[in-house]
Structure formats: C-alpha cells, structure tokens
Image (tube, rainbow, N blue to C red):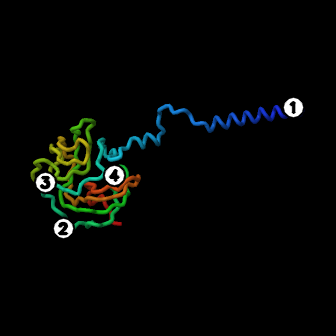
C-alpha cells in the first residue's frame, strides 16, 4: 500500500512539475513582435507619424526659433510669450492635452494644405499649419481654398519645395511652443505652428 501511495505521489509531483514548466517557459523568439513592441518600433526617435489629420509623413519634433522674413510679431496676443497653456491641437501623437509654454506669437494667415512629398510616398491631406510667409511667391493673403502653391516650410520630410493645394485659410495669431508630449519622451522645442483656438490658458 505504501509503495502504491509513494508511486502515486511521485507521478502527481511529476505532472505538477511538467505543468509548471510548460506555463512559465518562454516561447522561442520567432521574430514576431508583440503589439507593444510593434507600436514602439513604429515611432522614430526624432519624428513621429501624424495621426487623425491624415498626414502620413514624419513631423520634426523640435525646430529652430527662426521664422520667415516679413513675419509680424503679434502686438497683443491672447497668450503672451511665457504663457503656460494647454493644447487641444492634435497634429502629432502626444500633443493633445499637453502643457506648453509659448515662446513666440505672430499675426498671419494659417493654411491647412494637401500635398505630395517631394521624397515620394502617399499624399499628405489637410496638414496644419503652414503660414502665408512659408509659401513661395504667395502674393496677398488670404489665399482661397483650391489655390495651388509651392511650400517653403520644412516641418515634415519632403515638404519643402512640394506643390500643394490650399484646403482652408484662417487669419489668426500663430504660436511657437515648447511642450512635453503626453506620450513621454523628450521636451519638444520650438514647435511650429499652433493657432490661438488650439490653446487654452492654464
């Protein structure tokens, strides 16, 4: 009787041990990524894919504080330089809901544009924003929707020199901001552009 009990106990232990090792053993790497890995690998260190506005290019995170010649500094902006603001703009991942600091404010005409990057790839639809001073030989603002233009802006890869169509025009104050993305990562410096109605005071 004792022998059969011991044998049964050994068999039970072996079965438990086998189940335990099967559930904790990591499967061999088959070269496929987990969903989390795939999302992480899809984001470039220095640029991010555009999201719900249809932009398929990569937007530069940080930029220069330099602005086009002739751009007029806003005399009485809603958000003066140094203001702490909350962004509702959703041009890039991690922008919407981010806290930002205004570093410059200008009065101009802001356009949303559609264009095909000079570097190739899919057309970019309704890119926000390009300002009047970033268009070649633009003439007097505002330009009407449907107007064909050439872009001098360099916000995204393949943008500078691209043929574009004006989708909409808005005479407004545009801002350059520094902000920390809600998705984490490094501080974004001198982001161009955010319009007045995309900001709220904090």
Distance between the alpha carbons at the discs numbered 2 and 4: 27 Å
First of labels 1, 2 by sequence position: 1
Q: Dot 2 surroundings within 10 Å: few (below 14), some, or many (20 or more)?
A: few
Residue sitting at x 30%, y 58%: 198
Distance between the alpha carbons at the discs numbered 1 and 4: 72 Å
First of labels 1, 4 by sequence position: 1
Residue at the spot of label 2: 75
- Whether the residues at callouts 1 and 4 have beta carbons within 8 Å, the answer is no
State left or right for residue 180 relative to residue 136.
right
How many numbered marks are there? 4
Q: Secondary structure at mark 2?
A: loop
- Whether the residues at callouts 2 and 4 have beta carbons within 8 Å, the answer is no
Tag nearer the camera, 4 or 3: 4
Q: Dot 3 surroundings within 10 Å: few (below 14), some, or many (20 or more)?
A: some
Distance between the alpha carbons at the discs numbered 4 and 3: 25 Å
First of labels 3, 1 by sequence position: 1
Residue at the spot of label 1: 3
The picture places residue 106, in percent across and down from the top left corner, at 20, 61
Residue at the spot of label 3: 141
First of labels 2, 3 by sequence position: 2
Q: Secondary structure at mark 4?
A: loop
Tag nearer the camera, 3 or 1: 1
The picture places residue 56, in percent across and down from the top left corner, at 30, 41
Q: Dot 1 surroundings within 10 Å: few (below 14), some, or many (20 or more)?
A: few
Whether residue 148 is visible, yes or no, is: yes
Of 50 and 126, nearer the camera is 50
Tag nearer the camera, 1 or 4: 1
Residue sitting at x 24%, y 62%: 104
98 above or below 136? Answer: below
Residue sitting at x 51%, y 33%: 29
């Amino acid at each position: 009787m004792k022998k059969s009990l011991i044998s049964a106990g050994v068999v039970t232990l072996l079965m438990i041990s086998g189940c335990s090792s099967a559930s904790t053993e990591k499967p061999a790497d088959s070269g496929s990524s987990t969903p989390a890995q795939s999302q992480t690998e899809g984001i470039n260190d220095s640029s991010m894919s555009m999201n719900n506005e249809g932009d398929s290019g990569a937007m530069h995170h940080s930029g220069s504080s330099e602005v086009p010649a002739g751009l007029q500094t806003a005399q009485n902006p809603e958000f003066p330089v140094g203001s702490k603001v909350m962004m509702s703009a959703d041009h890039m991942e991690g922008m919407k809901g981010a806290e930002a600091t205004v570093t410059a404010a200008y009065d101009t005409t802001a356009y949303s544009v559609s264009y095909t990057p000079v570097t190739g790839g899919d057309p970019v639809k309704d890119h926000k924003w390009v300002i009047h001073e970033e268009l070649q030989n633009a003439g007097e603002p505002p330009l009407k929707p449907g107007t064909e233009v050439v872009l001098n802006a360099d916000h995204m890869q393949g943008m500078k020199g691209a043929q574009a169509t004006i989708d909409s025009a808005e005479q407004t104050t545009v801002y350059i901001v520094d902000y920390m993305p809600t998705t984490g990562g490094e501080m974004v410096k001198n982001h161009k552009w955010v319009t007045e109605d995309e900001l709220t005071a904090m």
